[in-house]
Amino acid sequence: MTPFIAEMLGTFLLILLGNGAVSNVVLKDTFGHGSGWLAITTGWALAIYVGVLVAAPYSGAHLNPAVTISLAITGLFEWTQVAPYILAQFIGAMFAMLVLYIGHRDHYDRTEDPDIKLSTFCNTPAIKNYPRNLINEVVGTFVLVFAVLYIVKPELVIDNTTVNFGLGSLGAIPVAFVVWSIGLSLGGTTGYAINPARDLGPRIMHAILPIKGKRDSNWSYSWIPVLGPIIGGAIAAILYLALA
């Protein structure tokens, strides 16, 4: 498996299972309908676990343009590979929403509220306040990337010698817990996109797919889940370098 395919497949699994959890909770007449925020945040955490588990051995499992850019800022990733990784992430996210839509078509047809349908694709703020919405996405992604940087390159100092060690596939577990914590603690304001591909890719699919009774794709908000995570990740990378 190439890194490009790994990023595409890992992001596909992330969005399929993450937005699948949202769809299971909010779309009408699913068995999970109405099971609440805890089910959604847990679903996203486990989705991260599965995506990272599959992609990590081949690409490092960025699955997120903000993570890719941040790793490049720290020097842990080559800038020449940033664009291919981001392209793979967007392809994976968009294809995942196509599969989800096909599988949930009956439930989309039975769900009357167009805002709920949109929420299964992308993020909308609980209270529309663009400056604060942006700050929340910045803060959430800062937490994600700052934690990931210490998972990516954990170190021990033994007898004045720095020893780098990795967690292998177990590295997917702490990342999942980080995302779960963000969702439970910070996610209620904007839905915690913390990932440009996770929001913009599915938002494009919402605009394209023939969803019965859909609304517009809320493009006026779409820049926040893109710019906010990039800013938050960059701040985390700069602070990581300053503390290194």
Image (cartoon, rainbow, N blue to C red):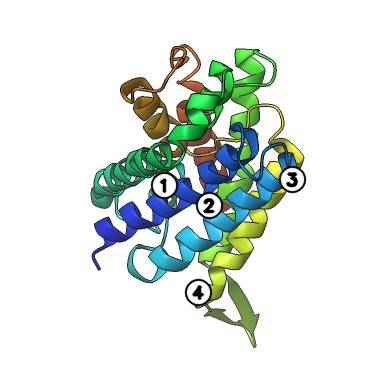
Determine which of the numbered discs, if any, sits on residue 38 in the image: 3
Residue type highlighted by circle 2 = Leu
Q: Which comes before the other along the chain, label 1 or label 2? A: 1
Position of residue 98 relative to residue 157, above or below, is above
Q: In terms of sequence position, does the residue under pointer 3 or pointer 2 come before the other?
A: 3
CB of mark 3 within 8 Å of CB of mark 4? no
Asked which secondary structure carries label 4, the reply is helix
- Local SS, label 2: helix
Three-letter amino acid code at disc 3?
Leu
Q: Which residue bears the numbered disc 2?
A: 241
Residue pointed to by mark 1: 73
Which of the two marks, 4 or 2, is nearer to us in this view? Answer: 4
- The residue lying toward the viewer, choosing from 214 and 63, is 214
Point out the frontmost of discs 3 and 2: 3
Q: Tell me the number on the disc at residue 169.
A: 4
* Percent coordinates x, y for residue 169 in the rendering: 50, 74
Mark 3 and mark 1 residues within 8 Å of each other at the beta carbon:
no
- Of the residues under marks 4 and 2, which one precedes in the sequence? 4
Q: Residue at x 67, y 58 (%)?
A: 177
Q: Quarter holding the C terminus? A: bottom right
User: How far apart are the two marked residues, 1 and 2, measured between alpha carbons?
Assistant: 9 Å
Mark 3 or mark 4, which has the lower sequence index? 3
Q: Is residue 194 above or below residue 47?
A: above
